[in-house]
Image (tube, grey):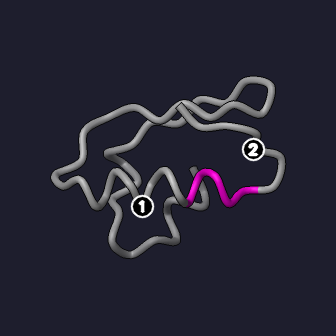
Amino acid sequence: MEQLKWEPFLDASEIGVAVKNGIVTLSGIVDSYSKKILAEKVAKKIAGVRAGV
């Protein structure tokens, strides 16, 4: 969640984050496909993340 806050293009309050055993699940609604892709890329860059859903 903290990493999403550093992205000026994203509103972190629109995105929910859940993590279990290195697998990140993002939820919520963003207003463009490019924001969805960016949120996924940001989550996958974090150390310890094995997969994103």
Q: Position of residue 13 (x, y in %)?
A: 36, 48
Disc 1 crowd rating (10 Å Cα; few below 14, some 14-19, many 20+) is: some
Q: Position of residue 22 (x, y in %)?
A: 77, 33
| Range of magenta residues | 42-46
Query: For the residue labelled by badge 1, is the local secondary structure a helix, a strand or a loop?
Result: helix
Q: Which mark is residue 49?
A: 2
Q: Residue at 60% across / 61% down in the picture?
A: 3
In screen coordinates, is 14 left or right of 25?
left
Q: Residue at 83% across / 46% down in the picture?
A: 48
How far apart are the alpha carbons under marks 1 and 2? 16 Å
Disc 2 crowd rating (10 Å Cα; few below 14, some 14-19, many 20+) is: some
Which tag, 1 or 2, sits closer to the chain's start? 1
Q: Residue at 51% across / 59% down in the picture?
A: 4
**CB under 8 Å between callouts 1 and 2?**
no
Q: Where on the picture, by quarter, is residue 23?
A: top right
Q: Position of residue 9 (x, y in %)?
A: 33, 72
Query: For the residue labelled by badge 2, is the local secondary structure a helix, a strand or a loop?
Result: loop
Residue situated furthest left in the rendering: 31
The stretch drawn in magenta includes residue 33: no
- What amino acid type should be assigned to the residue bearing mark 2? Val
Q: Which mark is residue 38?
A: 1
Q: Position of residue 5 (x, y in %)?
A: 49, 63
Nearest to the observer: residue 18 or residue 47: 47
Give the dominant element type of the magenta stretch: helix, strand or loop: helix
Q: Which mark is residue 23?
A: none
In screen coordinates, is 36 left or right of 2?
left
Q: Where on the picture, by quarter, is residue 45?
A: bottom right
